[in-house]
Image (cartoon, rainbow, N blue to C red):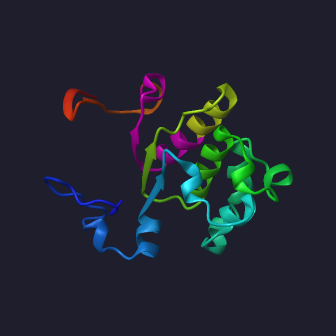
Amino acid sequence: MGLLRPNRGLVRVAGRDPARIAPRELARLAGYVTQDPERSFLAATVEGDLLLGLTRDERTRVGDVADALGLPLSRFGARNPFTLSGGEQRRHSLACQLVRRPPLLVLDEPTFGQDRRGYEGLLALVRERVAAGTAVVAATHDLRFAADLAGRVVRIAAGRILEDAE
């Protein structure tokens, strides 16, 4: 995502060093959902946060994505994102990225704090994006999520690859 330089090797997004891509362009190429979703909130309302920087086409998807993640705008749109529960904040952060439909989606512990309904909504939307060609890289301790979504699982411990399975 261009936030840190790699210790070794190269990281490329669309064949380019993400640290050298303008933030606006990088946001179109790669969506990042952090482990701490409150660090990504930029507007005073859920709806304002979801609409921030979107194209006209992307704006048409906001309601459907919010509904699918259990955050209907009729109920949550006027709320401040900081007042949401932890699970709602995580789904809101994911919604902000999913409406953009970037070709790469990077998820850090996406299922943390989700109940069954939240998990299923999140999984369904991410699967939909994968089916449409989005590449997903997820850092997770949730082995069920990895099994439900991944075509390839790389298990890492103490900086070493323990397993690389497709």
The residue at 31%/66% (across/down) is 18
Q: Is residue 125 depicted above or below 61 in this figure? A: above
Q: Quadrant of the N terminus?
A: bottom left
Nearer to me, 83 or 128: 83
The residue at 56%/35% (across/down) is 123
| Position in image of residue 56 (x %, y %) | 66, 74
Q: In the figure, is residue 75 to the left or right of 115?
A: right
Q: Which region is colored magenta?
A: 125-146
Name the residue at the left extreme: 8
Determine which quarter of the picture holds residue 61: bottom right
| Position in image of residue 12 (x %, y %) | 25, 61
Q: In the figure, is residue 28 to the left or right of 87?
A: left
Name the residue at the right extreme: 74
Q: Is residue 97 depicted above or below 166 in this figure? A: below
Determine which quarter of the picture holds residue 166: top left
Q: Is residue 67 magenta?
A: no
The residue at 72%/66% (across/down) is 48
Q: Is residue 133 magenta?
A: yes
- Number of marks drawn: 0
Q: In the figure, is residue 6 to the left or right of 26?
A: left
Nearer to me, 82 or 124: 82
| Position in image of residue 40 (x %, y %) | 55, 58
| Position in image of residue 106 (x %, y %) | 42, 49
